[in-house]
Amino acid sequence: MRFRLGYVGIAFAGVAACLFPDPSPLGGDDGGADAIANDVTSDVTPVDAGGDGDADAGPVCDPSKPFDSIKRLDELEIDDQYKETLTPDELDIWFGETLHSDAGNTSEIMHATRDASTSTFGTPSVESSIAPGDVDPAISDDGLTLYFSKFGTVGSWDLFETVRSDRKSPFSLGVQLPGAIQSSSSDTAAFVAFDQSLYFASARAGTNDIWRAPAQDGGFGAPAPVTSLSSGGNDEGVVLTHDGLWAYVTSDRTDLGSAGSFDIYLAHRATTSDDFGALVNQTELNGSSAERANWISWDGCRLYFESTRNRPSGASLYVATKIP
């Protein structure tokens, strides 16, 4: 689920599951700073982590340095794509898909695979264990738990999980996360962090802010707001590097030189017990369209994100790459 322009006020799942329930304020264009992403490809060869989700911990690329190139994931284009999430070896990808070709704007979670992290993904298919209308997938590091958001159970959007025994098995039916995580408002955009805590966006305190539920007894403890990453605007999700020291935040805040309705910002902290410092606009990623950061490779060299720059009524999936 994406840019909660209207998520809190949406009354039924068929409409709410759209990537952009009301696309007009977000816009999207092909000109100016946005044009770089449509045809630029990367000459960087990604590190192939291999194994069942194993990857070397700690960034190889310097998060403070800008990304060198941006590429659209054309092989995953169907209609309206958002919120991609990958296993650490980057061989499996899940993402949300909204089909605007039917009257109901059907939303589904899609899955695609590839044989190597340097290859294109194969044809995506529907993740059959997750019901239509459920959105915002987030995969655990071992590839065995998939988190997502479902409309209208406790609040407007609630957090669920589905599990499987190994990466070759299908996922089970989803179950709602414990009540301490849920609220009567919108809880979406889950991200599994380096310490297995769950970050997500929630409107329980008014506007959408970043919240964190710590890993506890095989599940999660009570969530708390991450005030250093939140603002007075709508903060639509966060992605942490694998060392936990850098955070890519998506927000429509207007105090940090916003280029569009939603932009990607970067914050740093010295240790994982510290608060994050000041956010910096990632100008090489942002344009007059809307962007959201969704997943970062374990070496810190590839940021997977979504953007409306290619279409006026939805988003496409991109990967930004930097040279180590």
Image (tube, rainbow, N blue to C red):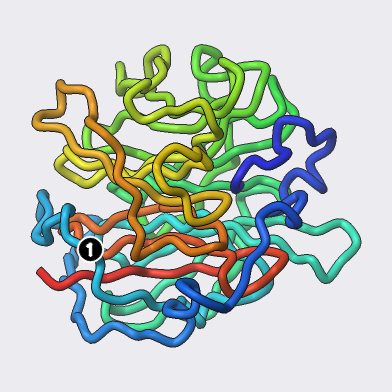
**Which residue is at the far right?**
103
Query: In terms of image quadrants, where is residue 29?
Result: bottom right
Instruction: Look at the image and tell me in which quarter the C terminus lies.
Output: bottom left
In the image: residue 213, left or right of residue 273? right
In front of the other: 36 or 224: 36
Query: In terms of image quadrants, where is residue 69?
Result: bottom left
Q: Picture coordinates of residue 313 (x, y %)?
A: 72, 65
Residue type beneath disc 1: Pro
In the image: residue 84, left or right of residue 267? right
The answer to whether one can see residue 162 in this image is no
In the image: residue 226, left or right of residue 77? left
With respect to residue 207, does 72 lie above or below?
below
Q: How busy is the neighbourhood of tag 1: few (under 14 within 10 Å), some, or many (20 plus)?
A: some
With respect to residue 124, does 287 lie above or below?
above
Q: Picture coordinates of residue 37 (x, y %)?
A: 44, 77
Going 36% across and 53% down the picture, which residue do you hit? 295
In front of the other: 241 or 233: 233
Going 83% across and 71% down the picture, which residue do you hit? 101
Going 86% across and 66% down the picture, which residue do you hit? 102
Going 17% across and 65% down the picture, which residue do you hit? 49
How many callouts does the rendering have? 1
With respect to residue 19, does 140 lie above or below?
above
For label 1, the SS is: loop
Q: Picture coordinates of residue 197 (x, y %)?
A: 31, 29
Query: In terms of image quadrants, where is residue 210?
Result: top left
Residue marked by disc 1: 66
